Image (cartoon, rainbow, N blue to C red):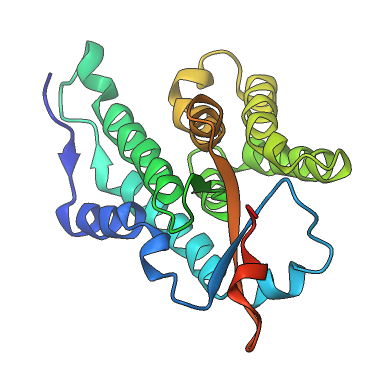
Amino acid sequence: MPFPLVDWPRFIAATILLLTPIGLFHGRRVRYRAISRDWDHHWPQVLQLGLHTIDFLRAALGTWLLLASLTVAPKAHGLAAFAPLLVSTAIRVLAVWLQAIVCREPEAIQAPFLFVAASLLAGTAPLPATIALALAIPIALGARAPIAFFPLLSVFFFAADFLFAGRGAIIKHVAEICLPLVPWLWALLFNRDLVVGYRSRRGEDDAALSPLR
Protein backbone atom coordinates (compact mmCIF):
# COMPACT_ATOMS: atom_id res chain seq x y z
CA MET A 1 0.00 0.00 0.00
CA PRO A 2 1.56 3.34 -1.04
CA PHE A 3 2.29 5.75 1.76
CA PRO A 4 0.43 9.08 1.84
CA LEU A 5 2.16 12.28 0.87
CA VAL A 6 3.65 13.81 4.00
CA ASP A 7 4.43 17.42 4.85
CA TRP A 8 7.28 16.49 7.17
CA PRO A 9 7.67 19.74 9.17
CA ARG A 10 3.97 19.70 10.06
CA PHE A 11 3.99 15.94 10.67
CA ILE A 12 6.98 16.06 13.03
CA ALA A 13 5.53 19.00 14.94
CA ALA A 14 2.20 17.19 15.24
CA THR A 15 3.71 13.98 16.55
CA ILE A 16 5.74 15.86 19.16
CA LEU A 17 2.66 17.73 20.35
CA LEU A 18 0.40 14.69 20.40
CA LEU A 19 2.66 11.88 21.55
CA THR A 20 4.33 13.66 24.46
CA PRO A 21 2.51 12.54 27.64
CA ILE A 22 1.39 15.46 29.79
CA GLY A 23 2.15 13.34 32.86
CA LEU A 24 5.86 13.86 32.25
CA PHE A 25 5.44 17.51 33.24
CA HIS A 26 3.53 16.94 36.47
CA GLY A 27 5.76 18.24 39.22
CA ARG A 28 5.82 17.58 42.95
CA ARG A 29 2.86 19.88 43.63
CA VAL A 30 0.54 18.02 41.27
CA ARG A 31 -1.77 15.60 43.05
CA TYR A 32 -4.37 13.20 41.66
CA ARG A 33 -7.97 12.58 42.60
CA ALA A 34 -10.17 9.78 41.30
CA ILE A 35 -13.02 11.05 39.14
CA SER A 36 -15.43 8.83 41.07
CA ARG A 37 -14.94 10.91 44.23
CA ASP A 38 -16.51 14.20 45.32
CA TRP A 39 -15.16 17.25 43.48
CA ASP A 40 -17.05 20.15 45.05
CA HIS A 41 -14.00 21.57 46.86
CA HIS A 42 -11.38 20.67 44.26
CA TRP A 43 -12.51 22.56 41.14
CA PRO A 44 -10.50 25.72 41.99
CA GLN A 45 -7.35 23.63 42.36
CA VAL A 46 -8.02 21.83 39.09
CA LEU A 47 -8.45 25.13 37.26
CA GLN A 48 -5.23 26.46 38.80
CA LEU A 49 -3.25 23.72 37.08
CA GLY A 50 -2.29 25.41 33.83
CA LEU A 51 -1.19 22.14 32.26
CA HIS A 52 -4.86 21.35 31.58
CA THR A 53 -5.10 24.41 29.31
CA ILE A 54 -1.83 23.49 27.63
CA ASP A 55 -3.16 19.96 27.13
CA PHE A 56 -6.26 21.28 25.35
CA LEU A 57 -4.34 23.69 23.11
CA ARG A 58 -1.62 21.24 22.11
CA ALA A 59 -4.18 18.53 21.31
CA ALA A 60 -6.10 20.93 19.08
CA LEU A 61 -3.00 22.26 17.32
CA GLY A 62 -1.40 18.83 17.03
CA THR A 63 -4.54 17.31 15.52
CA TRP A 64 -4.86 20.13 13.00
CA LEU A 65 -1.20 19.84 11.99
CA LEU A 66 -1.40 16.06 11.69
CA LEU A 67 -4.46 16.08 9.46
CA ALA A 68 -2.99 18.89 7.33
CA SER A 69 0.30 17.04 6.91
CA LEU A 70 -1.13 13.91 5.26
CA THR A 71 -2.65 13.79 1.78
CA VAL A 72 -3.56 10.98 -0.61
CA ALA A 73 -0.85 9.99 -3.07
CA PRO A 74 -1.59 10.68 -6.76
CA LYS A 75 -3.51 7.91 -8.53
CA ALA A 76 -4.05 6.10 -5.25
CA HIS A 77 -7.01 3.76 -5.31
CA GLY A 78 -8.55 1.10 -3.13
CA LEU A 79 -7.01 0.80 0.32
CA ALA A 80 -4.22 3.19 -0.66
CA ALA A 81 -6.74 6.03 -0.84
CA PHE A 82 -7.33 5.56 2.91
CA ALA A 83 -3.64 5.71 3.86
CA PRO A 84 -3.83 9.22 5.39
CA LEU A 85 -6.88 8.19 7.41
CA LEU A 86 -5.21 5.01 8.68
CA VAL A 87 -1.98 6.78 9.64
CA SER A 88 -3.67 9.73 11.35
CA THR A 89 -6.11 7.46 13.20
CA ALA A 90 -3.30 5.25 14.51
CA ILE A 91 -1.32 8.26 15.74
CA ARG A 92 -4.32 9.90 17.39
CA VAL A 93 -5.37 6.70 19.17
CA LEU A 94 -1.78 6.16 20.34
CA ALA A 95 -1.67 9.77 21.56
CA VAL A 96 -4.75 9.38 23.76
CA TRP A 97 -3.43 6.08 25.11
CA LEU A 98 -0.11 7.67 26.07
CA GLN A 99 -1.82 10.59 27.81
CA ALA A 100 -3.82 8.11 29.88
CA ILE A 101 -1.24 5.53 30.91
CA VAL A 102 1.61 7.87 31.86
CA CYS A 103 0.55 8.67 35.42
CA ARG A 104 2.53 8.93 38.66
CA GLU A 105 -0.37 7.58 40.71
CA PRO A 106 -0.04 3.79 41.18
CA GLU A 107 -2.82 1.60 39.81
CA ALA A 108 -4.39 4.59 38.04
CA ILE A 109 -4.56 6.23 34.63
CA GLN A 110 -5.26 9.82 33.78
CA ALA A 111 -8.66 10.84 32.45
CA PRO A 112 -7.73 12.94 29.38
CA PHE A 113 -11.00 14.90 29.21
CA LEU A 114 -9.59 18.04 27.60
CA PHE A 115 -7.17 16.21 25.32
CA VAL A 116 -9.96 14.07 23.86
CA ALA A 117 -12.36 17.03 23.57
CA ALA A 118 -9.78 19.14 21.73
CA SER A 119 -8.88 16.25 19.42
CA LEU A 120 -12.51 15.88 18.38
CA LEU A 121 -13.12 19.60 17.94
CA ALA A 122 -10.00 20.02 15.80
CA GLY A 123 -10.74 16.90 13.76
CA THR A 124 -12.55 16.49 10.49
CA ALA A 125 -16.07 16.81 11.92
CA PRO A 126 -16.24 19.76 14.37
CA LEU A 127 -20.05 20.12 14.20
CA PRO A 128 -20.88 16.56 15.35
CA ALA A 129 -18.08 16.88 17.92
CA THR A 130 -19.61 20.06 19.34
CA ILE A 131 -23.05 18.48 19.55
CA ALA A 132 -21.63 15.33 21.18
CA LEU A 133 -19.76 17.38 23.79
CA ALA A 134 -22.83 19.52 24.49
CA LEU A 135 -24.79 16.35 25.27
CA ALA A 136 -22.15 14.19 26.97
CA ILE A 137 -20.90 16.81 29.46
CA PRO A 138 -24.21 17.72 31.18
CA ILE A 139 -25.44 14.12 31.19
CA ALA A 140 -22.24 12.80 32.78
CA LEU A 141 -22.23 15.63 35.34
CA GLY A 142 -25.93 15.28 36.08
CA ALA A 143 -25.61 11.55 36.60
CA ARG A 144 -22.54 12.10 38.83
CA ALA A 145 -20.72 9.54 36.70
CA PRO A 146 -17.76 11.33 35.06
CA ILE A 147 -16.47 8.09 33.55
CA ALA A 148 -19.64 7.95 31.44
CA PHE A 149 -18.40 11.02 29.58
CA PHE A 150 -16.16 8.91 27.36
CA PRO A 151 -18.62 6.29 26.06
CA LEU A 152 -21.37 8.92 25.84
CA LEU A 153 -19.13 11.16 23.76
CA SER A 154 -18.43 8.33 21.33
CA VAL A 155 -22.10 7.33 21.03
CA PHE A 156 -23.34 10.91 20.60
CA PHE A 157 -20.66 11.70 18.03
CA PHE A 158 -21.62 8.59 16.04
CA ALA A 159 -25.30 9.58 16.12
CA ALA A 160 -24.69 13.23 15.22
CA ASP A 161 -22.26 12.32 12.45
CA PHE A 162 -24.71 9.85 10.96
CA LEU A 163 -27.51 12.42 11.17
CA PHE A 164 -25.60 15.24 9.47
CA ALA A 165 -23.25 13.42 7.10
CA GLY A 166 -24.82 10.03 6.50
CA ARG A 167 -23.47 6.51 6.68
CA GLY A 168 -20.51 7.22 4.41
CA ALA A 169 -18.95 9.65 6.89
CA ILE A 170 -18.60 7.04 9.62
CA ILE A 171 -15.47 5.53 8.03
CA LYS A 172 -13.90 8.95 7.51
CA HIS A 173 -14.48 9.86 11.14
CA VAL A 174 -13.55 6.56 12.74
CA ALA A 175 -10.84 8.27 14.82
CA GLU A 176 -13.36 10.58 16.46
CA ILE A 177 -15.54 7.59 17.35
CA CYS A 178 -12.65 5.56 18.78
CA LEU A 179 -10.69 8.20 20.72
CA PRO A 180 -13.09 8.61 23.68
CA LEU A 181 -13.26 4.84 24.14
CA VAL A 182 -9.51 4.39 24.68
CA PRO A 183 -9.19 5.54 28.33
CA TRP A 184 -12.61 4.13 29.25
CA LEU A 185 -11.85 0.64 27.90
CA TRP A 186 -8.33 0.63 29.35
CA ALA A 187 -9.66 1.49 32.81
CA LEU A 188 -12.29 -1.25 32.60
CA LEU A 189 -10.05 -3.95 31.17
CA PHE A 190 -7.18 -3.41 33.60
CA ASN A 191 -9.18 -2.28 36.64
CA ARG A 192 -7.56 1.14 36.89
CA ASP A 193 -8.88 4.27 38.56
CA LEU A 194 -9.33 7.27 36.28
CA VAL A 195 -7.79 10.31 37.96
CA VAL A 196 -7.44 14.03 37.28
CA GLY A 197 -4.47 16.13 38.31
CA TYR A 198 -4.81 19.28 40.40
CA ARG A 199 -2.48 21.71 42.12
CA SER A 200 -1.99 21.18 45.83
CA ARG A 201 -2.01 24.04 48.29
CA ARG A 202 1.13 24.90 50.15
CA GLY A 203 1.36 23.21 53.50
CA GLU A 204 -1.15 20.47 52.73
CA ASP A 205 -0.26 17.02 53.98
CA ASP A 206 0.66 14.66 51.15
CA ALA A 207 -1.09 11.69 52.70
CA ALA A 208 -4.38 13.55 52.84
CA LEU A 209 -4.15 14.35 49.14
CA SER A 210 -4.07 10.81 47.78
CA PRO A 211 -7.27 10.05 45.84
CA LEU A 212 -7.04 6.34 46.52
CA ARG A 213 -6.67 6.32 50.31
Q: Which residue is drawn at 54% across and 31% down?
A: 191
Expressed as whole percent of the image width and height from the top left, the position of residue 159 reads: 69, 22
- Identify the image quadrant of residue 165: top right
Q: Nearer the viewer, residue 103 or 16?
A: 103
Q: Can residue 113 be seen in this view?
A: no
In this rendering, is residue 134 above or below 160? below
Expressed as whole percent of the image width and height from the top left, the position of residue 26 reads: 44, 70
Direction left: furthest residue? 2
In this rendering, is residue 170 above or below 119? above
Q: Can residue 51 be seen in this view?
A: yes
Expressed as whole percent of the image width and height from the top left, the position of residue 176 reads: 51, 33
- Quadrant that contains the N terminus: top left
Q: Residue at x 54, y 30 (%)?
A: 181
Determine whether, in the image, residue 163 is placed left or right of residue 40. left
Direction bottom: furthest residue? 202
- Identify the image quadrant of residue 129: top right
Q: How many labels does the image show?
A: 0
Q: Which residue is drawn at 11% across and 24% down?
A: 2
Determine whether, in the image, residue 103 is placed left or right of residue 74. right
Determine whether, in the image, residue 78 is placed left or right of residue 134. left
- Identify the image quadrant of residue 199: bottom right
- Quadrant that contains the C terminus: bottom right
Expressed as whole percent of the image width and height from the top left, the position of residue 77 reads: 21, 14
Q: Residue at x 79, y 40 (%)?
A: 140
